[in-house]
Amino acid sequence: MDDRLVHATAEMFAILGDPTRVRLLYTLLDDGEQRVGSLAAGIGVSESAVSHALRLLRTSKVVAARREGRAILYHLDDPHVRQLLEVTREHLVEESGVPRPDA
Amino acid sequence: MDDRLVHATAEMFAILGDPTRVRLLYTLLDDGEQRVGSLAAGIGVSESAVSHALRLLRTSKVVAARREGRAILYHLDDPHVRQLLEVTREHLVEESGVPRPDA
């Protein structure tokens, strides 16, 4: 596999490898597009921690943003990212025996 | 999302976030089940580096092994892992403009 692709892949996974960023991504997956404030309230961390996490996730093309009036709304970048998160959860629920969040 | 599941997910992604482990996983994805020796030769690192990477990947349920006679053969744990790797590559090829490995 192309060296740049290997490094881009490793870098993307490394950025995903953090509990706050994981919580944020599954909140966007399960509850849809949101502002920084509601994400922060939802996962119980400060808005500045959420902003920092979103900045990393946008740089690595995992999350995207759009403006609506004065609000900035964040969402998962594309269907690949949704699929990646869904399949990872399926895998870990099966492997670890942790109950599904909607069970 | 359940706290244990969040941590298991972050831990799995963190383990995937390394270029040698990424190379190893895509070799198993593209070329199928293999021994340590052929993996090491294929990606150009030492057998001990491959063994170390495989140990981490087995602990995190990404890779599995089976014995065939005196050989130990390594493969991706299940279809979820294959899907995870495929969708990640699709995403990054689209986002980064890096050519597909088979292009």
Image: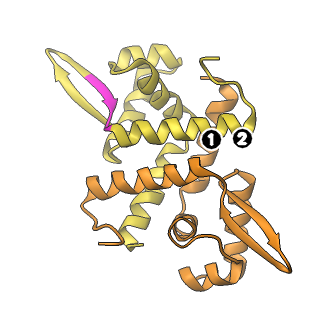
Chain colours: A yellow, B orange
Give the residue at x 31% y 38%.
A78
Image coordinates of residue B79 in percent, x first then y, are: 58, 50
Residue marked by disc 2: A95
Residue marked by disc 1: A91
User: Of the numbered discs in the image, which one, if any, rests on residue B36?
Assistant: none
Residue B20 belongs to the span the image colors magenta: no
Please, is residue B5 above or below residue B95 in the view? above
Which quarter of the figure has residue A73? top left
Which quarter of the figure has residue A63? top left
Give the residue at x 27% y 58%.
B96
The residue positioned farthest toward the left in the image shown? A69
The residue positioned farthest toward the right in the image shown? B70
Q: Which residues are magenta?
A: A73-78
Image coordinates of residue A35 in percent, x first then y, are: 32, 18
Secondary element at image label 1: helix
Amino acid at circle 2: Glu
Q: Are marks 2 and 1 in contact (CB under 8 Å)?
A: yes
Amino acid at circle 1: His
The foreground one among A25 and B85 is B85
Which quarter of the figure has residue B42? bottom right
Q: Same chain for the residues at labels 2 and 1, yes or no?
A: yes
| Mark 1: few/some/many CA within 10 Å (<14, 14-19, 20+) | many
The N terminus of chain B is located in which quarter? top right
Secondary element at image label 2: helix
Give the residue at x 38% y 65%.
A5
